[in-house]
Image (cartoon, coloured by chain):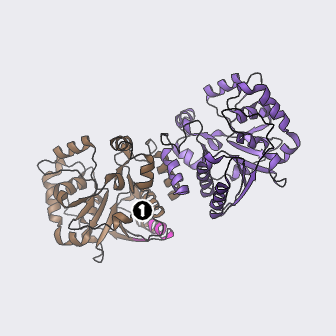
Chain colours: A purple, B brown
Amino acid sequence: MNILVTVNSNYILPLKVMLKSLFMSNAGERFDIYLLYTDVKENEIQDLRQYIDACGHSFYGIKIQDEFSSAPVIFHYTKEMYYRLLAYEFLPGTLDGILYLDPDILVLNPIKALYDMDMEHYLFAAAYHNIPAVKEVNRLRLTPYDIEEYYNSGVLLLNLELQRRNMSEEAIFHFIEKNETKLIMPDQDILNALFAKEIKPIDEKLYNYDARYYYYYKVSSNGLCDMDYVIHNTVFLHFCGKRKPWLKQYNGKFDALYKHYQKTALG
Amino acid sequence: MNILVTVNSNYILPLKVMLKSLFMSNAGERFDIYLLYTDVKENEIQDLRQYIDACGHSFYGIKIQDEFSSAPVIFHYTKEMYYRLLAYEFLPGTLDGILYLDPDILVLNPIKALYDMDMEHYLFAAAYHNIPAVKEVNRLRLTPYDIEEYYNSGVLLLNLELQRRNMSEEAIFHFIEKNETKLIMPDQDILNALFAKEIKPIDEKLYNYDARYYYYYKVSSNGLCDMDYVIHNTVFLHFCGKRKPWLKQYNGKFDALYKHYQKTALG
């Protein structure tokens, strides 16, 4: 199975935790981990390669230089954000598809059903977060783009084969230049504004569970989506937002579980 | 390493979770699990034996019948409670010591340091819970017995060799008959009233962390005993009280972690 990650040096440790949880929850599967990067040091790359090797999987680092000199840089986000949208340009042409994962994720259950899903004519598969307040803010913000749902870009299944034929970086760069001041989460805004109709929706409770909203999920599902459900069914538990579980001040519903995986991954 | 458990049929599932966490957190150690029981069915015993065998450890079931016909039965507790105090009578004479563990525990870290601790002249090692309100209630309740601390009986290191020489079941039964109406947690009350001076104290934050009091531990330690500390240092996380993490309504700080272990243990 092919997994895409795109981090800079600041996210190496959470990346290892995410990968460890992926390997643990998918025992018996073999993973090829592709990293698209710019700002990661050579010794960190070596360390990451050894880590993934020691877990019995394979690592492929693809350094991106200069190619993005024409890309606009938005001050509060890094250029690595765009890599998931333009991965089709940099990944080996032999790959038909790949699963992109943010580093602030825990993988709790097997990914196979998602990975093997028929992508039909869609460029991406992703989940949108159905929390009413969040939805409405993003819809208003991205007017006049016609957005029904606001997809989260933290888990993205990429139809590389189709993307190579139908996508272009010029359209993306053009969009950014036109909307720079309005963009809050650049890659996600681009994904939604330009590609909303070409995203196959997947269930957020399974594939992009926002760890901040345990009680929302539970109540809105009449109790069905409780902790038992999450632990047995949710595949990707996503620690969205600024409060990250590897930071000292974190105090969320999945605090103990994250730190348990962190200990398993990092000692 | 020798581990003692004493459950009836109602606690088989949590017992498996506890044992699984013990095995996972002590990779490389070999365990002999002794169960003292009365009310467990033969097929449940076989299932438990297979479970422990499959984990690479050994099971010894010791059925107790009749021996306790003279023991007072306190209506809201079962006779299995006493087994940890009288285990020295029933366990093989070849065992010098054993570690008793409640089934409502998760083992998060290696037990070796505790297990190998010098017992000196003490009959037991145990932790007391230092939460001020709880302490005072128990001290008053068990007057005139001279109790400094109120030890929790959920984790007990037993000095079997010394117990065989110095303890008697008559003293225990006599105490129960005299105090029946006052006893709230019989085995624990007995442990404290009769043996307080013969218990070697061990750190509750390491060896009997009460899962209900995360914030108390954190604040009273000036932040030292936070989630990172617990995950990396606490050996026994004890789900004291009536709200058990395997029940549907449970909603505590360690909910996700417990259910993660539960899935690992039971599928």
Q: Amino acid at mark 1?
A: Pro
Q: How many marks?
A: 1
* Left or right position of B141 against B96: left
Residue A29 in view, yes or no: yes
Pinpoint residue B238: horizontal percent, then vertical percent. 37, 52
Quadrant housing the N terminus of chain A:
bottom right
Above or below: residue B235 compared with residue B31: above
Asked whether B134 or A262 is in front, the reply is: A262
* Near-viewer residue (A94 or B224): B224
- Residue designated by label 1: B110
Identify the image quadrant of residue B97.
Answer: bottom left
Q: Is residue A145 left or right of residue B194?
A: right
Q: Is residue B58 magenta?
A: yes
**Nearer the observer, A42 or A210:** A42
Residue A250 in the figure: left or right of residue B139? right
Q: Residues within 10 Å of mark 1 (few under 14, many from 20)?
A: some
Q: Is residue A159 visible?
A: no
Picture residue at 59% right of the left edge, 48% below the top: A14
Q: Position of residue A153 (x, y in %)?
A: 69, 39
Q: Position of residue B192 (x, y in %)?
A: 20, 54
Q: From what the image shows, is residue B250 above or below residue B200?
A: above
Query: Which chain is mark 1 on?
Result: B
Q: What span is in magenta?
A: B48-59
